[in-house]
Structure formats: structure tokens, C-alpha cells
Amino acid sequence: MTDFWNGKRVLVTGGAGFIGSNLAIRLVDLGARVQLVDSMLPAYGADLANIEPVRERLRVNFSDVRDRHSLRWIVRGEDVIFSLAGQVSHLDSMEDPETDLEINCRSQLSLLECCRAVNPRARIVFASTRQIYGRPEYLPVDERHPLRPVDVNGINKLAAEMYYTLYHDVHGLATVSLRLTNTYGPRMDLRSDRKGFVGVFLRKALAGETIRLFGSGEQRRDFNYVDDVVDALLLAGASDGVGGQVFNLGHPRSYSLVDFVDALAVHLAFDRERVPFPPDLAAIDIGDYYGDFGAFSRTTGWLPRVDLAEGLERTIRWFRDPARGAGRG
Amino acid sequence: MTDFWNGKRVLVTGGAGFIGSNLAIRLVDLGARVQLVDSMLPAYGADLANIEPVRERLRVNFSDVRDRHSLRWIVRGEDVIFSLAGQVSHLDSMEDPETDLEINCRSQLSLLECCRAVNPRARIVFASTRQIYGRPEYLPVDERHPLRPVDVNGINKLAAEMYYTLYHDVHGLATVSLRLTNTYGPRMDLRSDRKGFVGVFLRKALAGETIRLFGSGEQRRDFNYVDDVVDALLLAGASDGVGGQVFNLGHPRSYSLVDFVDALAVHLAFDRERVPFPPDLAAIDIGDYYGDFGAFSRTTGWLPRVDLAEGLERTIRWFRDPARGAGRG
């Protein structure tokens, strides 16, 4: 894969965010000529410190993906485009659904329109989400599972993913979508209480605060360490024959929320308590989820290499490094 | 049902359009206090002549559903809201996808947000479409069929329908969606070449021009006469226990496009020819479609009463009436 990326012009939207920055660092190391686009909104996880290791070896274009005028110039000449910019809080999508629509739905359509107009040969990898399945009808969830999102964020991401597939089928753009599940690791935004339990639990555990488990804590999830997700994105961008397709990511092992907290407790000292589900979260909770990533595995050879125990250890070590992580928890 | 509507305050968005105007006329006759919202854009089928019979017995609010500020005032105090305003051309949605998104997706979310804020008890009936199924995997298509729209219009309508269901499930709004199939009848917009074959064929047959059938002409469809669709909308708006649900409309008999042209030829003289599918239409064609409307029938008692032969005869008579239809063909 090194050969593929060496010298390639690559655009990463949301490149100063959690996954975007990890991807950008890897791409720079692989010799790609990387451009990041980021609106630098802290609420969405953007932080220039994330790209500090490669700040002088890539180009940052400060711009919001909602700005369709600048987007038209930004996509020109790029060989591969990773569309990662997004609003990821399910709670925020319920309180301000039109902003979620603008970012997760309309801006994706604008990006595709820009590519169709000025760069129809670019490969485009879209970061979709398992949230579009809603409450699983069976487990593990494969790509044929019905799509019944339970919040506005899920609906908008679903529409966006469908645009990507459609622009392949009708206009011939080389798009591919990966449905990400819970991703964690270095550069994750731990500040927000509104972007899922993983970041909240990590922050509280690092700070020695009490972790509150909603409900039984027995809800199961699959977790991907961010390096494995970066591998998957790179494989999707470098593979022929995946145009117009949609793939789950996932992990061979699923864990309950209690398991997740137990894994944190191996390294960190904190208390835990069980509390009833808050009503706003209960309304959009999906119960157990873990995905079948066999299709992506068979197509690209991808397998997640980092298990939860090792991934959390690495993550904790990164956040505890006084040189980097101290100010972030 | 007369009792239910008598004295009710009813809002119809897109009320000067084809289906909206037929619905408004019926509602006025049933004693409802009707308000129409319409942007009066001719391309979307709006025509004040459509509501001529009841012009003095209802209120028209000229406004575009994209204008979320006026919408907030318009929905206040309404008992039932029929959300019919839409961009219906699949071809236009492919050429100007962001306008389609604004009307069919974002404006629907705005309408729901307005209702949540100022009128959470209104019943809301959304006109969805069979287009969200895409190419049928089996026939007749029921509501469990996978949703794989093949054009931007279908994706945006799908997202909108999901918002309506979600706002019931999470916020308790009394929403219900009907997935309409090919609707025809008086007040249909025959001027456009871009809104499906039914209007085009009718216009050409009325004018004695040659009808061009794409492909074999054996593609099957189901057709609903507009009075039957109005019945269905009224039943959906008056029924308890349908909150958050989604229902197909349809007809017990399906017909091929050739059958449709034959039915026109009973009354009108015109030529026909077969031509290959134009590429832009072939890319978004869905093959055969007809729907299973059993769920809606069982729930509300609805059955379409007008068969294609009778419906086309009535439609042709209406358009040929010199007092009304002459200038429309």
C-alpha cells in the first residue's frame, strides 16, 4: 500500500479532528501530498495540536464543508478524497436538526456535486456510521440489515451515504462508504459529554471521576482502535473494484459497557455507579450492536489488529503523556 | 368522515398544486376551515385556477415551505396538516440536487421543528412516494421492501419520511406517511416533460401528438385516480392509531405503459412510436413497480374506487371542458 500513496494528492475533510488527524499523519508518513480541510470548530473535535507531528509536511485549508464555494476549489486535482468532516453528536442532532442536516447531508451532496463538476476521477471515501441501522433486528449486523435510524444524525448520514452510492451508479464517481462503529484512540475528543460514552468514560477514568453506567451496562458494542480504522480507510481508498459499495467495519469481539469500564479499571482508579437511562438518551438508544465486517475483510483483506485491552492501554498512555495529553482530559 | 372534518382547521402545503388543490376542494366541501400554503412556482404545478371553485371559501398564504420563518406562524392552531409541497421531478433532482434537498428534505425537517415548537398536537400527513423503494426486488412491493432509491429525489423523500416517523417516535408528534404511486386526474400539471410519463402522455394524447414509448413499453405500474388519493389522505388524517406509521397506496390492477396508451386511445386520436430509453432516464429507471396497499386497507378501510379506464375518461373530460381545461394541455 505504501506504493499507492507515495506522491498521491490526498484531501481529508475534517482533517484536524480525531480520525482525520490520525489518517493525515499516516498519509504524510506514506509520502502522500496531503491537504486538510477543517472549520476548526472545537465542538466537532478539531484541534490543530492533533496534527502537530506533521504540521509542516501538509497543507491546511481553513474552511467549512458547508461552504460550497470554497469546496469547488479545494477538491480540484486531488487523487483521493476522504470525507470525514461531520457533526457526530446524536443528542445535538435532536436539538438542532437543521445544523446536522447542513453538515452531514447537504454538505456531502455539495462535495459530490463539486467532484462531478471539476474532479470526476477522484476516489472518494465516505465515513458513514453503524447508526444508520438503528436498533438491530439480528446480530451481528451485516450490510443487508434494514436501515432504520433512530435519530436525526442517523437519517442525515443515511441520506449522505445514499448520495455517495448514487453518484457512483449514475455519474460514475469512484465512491465507497465505510460504516464506522465505536472508534477510540489517541486524539479523540474527550471534552464533550454529547458524543457517546467512549469519550466520556475515558475522560472520567483519566480524571479519577465516577463513571455512570446507564441502565444495566450490559449493552454490547464493538470497538475499533483508530489505527485499525485508518488502515481500513487507506484500503478503501487504494482498492479497485469497490466503487459504489458500502462496508461495515467492526471487531471480532464485542464487549459490554461493563467490560469496557473493567478494561479501563486495569489501568486507572475511579468509581462507578449505575443510574437509570436519561429520557433523551433512552429515546434514541439502540440496545446491543455489533457488526459483521466480513464483506470488507474478504474484499480488501482488512482485519482489526488491536483488541480492546491493548487499544485502551495505548490510548491511556497517549493521553497521560505529559508532553501531549495533559491539557486534553 | 364528514363529521371529523367539519369545522376542523386544516393546512395544506402545496395547496395550489395537483393533489393539494383536489384535497383542498374536498376539505372545503366537508366543512373544514382550510388554509393553503403555496409558493406558486409554476414548475412545481401550482396554479390558482386549480382552486377556482373554492377560492372564496379558503385562505391562501403565499409562502415557500423553504421559508422556515413564515412556516412557524402558518402552522399555529392547525388541527391537521397535509404536507404535500414538493419538487417531484426526478430529472430535475439529478440536475439540481441541492434545490431538491432544500424543498423535499430540509423544509420537511423545518415543518416538523415548527410543529414541535408551536403546535405539537397537530396531526400531520406526509405525502411520501414509492420512489424511495428504487428497483423492486419483488412484486407487489410492500412496506417491508428494502429502501434503495435510485435518484436524488428518492433519497431526499426517504430522509423526509424518516424524519416524520422519528418525530412521532421521539417527540410524540402525530405523523403518518403515505407512499403515493402514479397519481393522475383533473388539475394535473401537463405542461412539464420532466415529471413522469403520465402527464406527458396525457398532454400529447389530448393534443393529437405522437406518444413516444421508451423501451418495450411493457414496464408495469399502478395508477391512482386523484379522488382515491384524496380519500386516502383524508382517512390518514382522520384515523387514530396510525401515528408514526408508513403506508403504501396502490391499485388492485397494474398496467403496462402500452396498456395506459391503449386506454387513452379509446378516447383520443394520436400516433405512437417506440424509441430507445434516453440515457438520463435509463440511469434512474426502476423497471416494473406495483405496490401492496393491504396494510392501509386493513387499517383504514381504504380501497381505490376508480379503475384506470374510468379515471382516464374522467380526466380527459375534465381537460377537454372548454371552460376549464382548454388552456392547460
Image: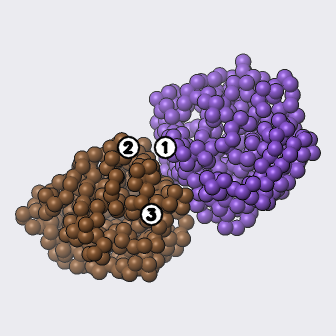
Chain colours: A purple, B brown
Q: Residues within 10 Å of mark 2 (few under 14, many from 20)?
A: some
Residue found at the very far right of the displayed protein: A266
Q: Are marks 1 and 3 on the same chain?
A: no
- Discs 2, 1 touching: Cβ within 8 Å: yes
**Mark positioned earlier in the residue sequence (3 or 2):** 2
Q: Residues within 10 Å of mark 1 (few under 14, many from 20)?
A: some
Q: Quadrant of residue A48?
A: top right
x, y percentage for residue A194?
A: 66, 43
The residue depicted at 65 percent of the width and 22 percent of the height is: A59
Q: Is residue B6 left or right of residue B52?
A: right
Q: Nearer the viewer, residue A61 or A191?
A: A191
Q: Mark 3 = which residue?
A: B174
x, y percentage for residue B10?
A: 29, 61
**Alpha carbons under labels 3 and 2: distance apart:** 20 Å
Image quarter of the N terminus of chain A:
top right
x, y percentage for residue A127?
A: 64, 44
Provide the secondary structure element on which disc 3 rests.
Answer: strand
**Alpha carbons under labels 1 and 3: distance apart:** 21 Å
Q: Quadrant of residue A199?
A: top right
Q: Is residue A193 left or right of residue A158?
A: right
Residue type beneath disc 2: Arg
Provide the secondary structure element on which disc 1 rests.
Answer: helix
**Alpha carbons under labels 2 and 1: distance apart:** 11 Å
Image quarter of the C terminus of chain A:
top right
Q: Mark 2 = which residue?
A: B68
The mark lying in front, picked from 3 and 2, is: 3
Residue A98 has which mark? 1
Q: Chain of mark 2?
A: B
The residue depicted at 75 percent of the width and 42 percent of the height is: A200
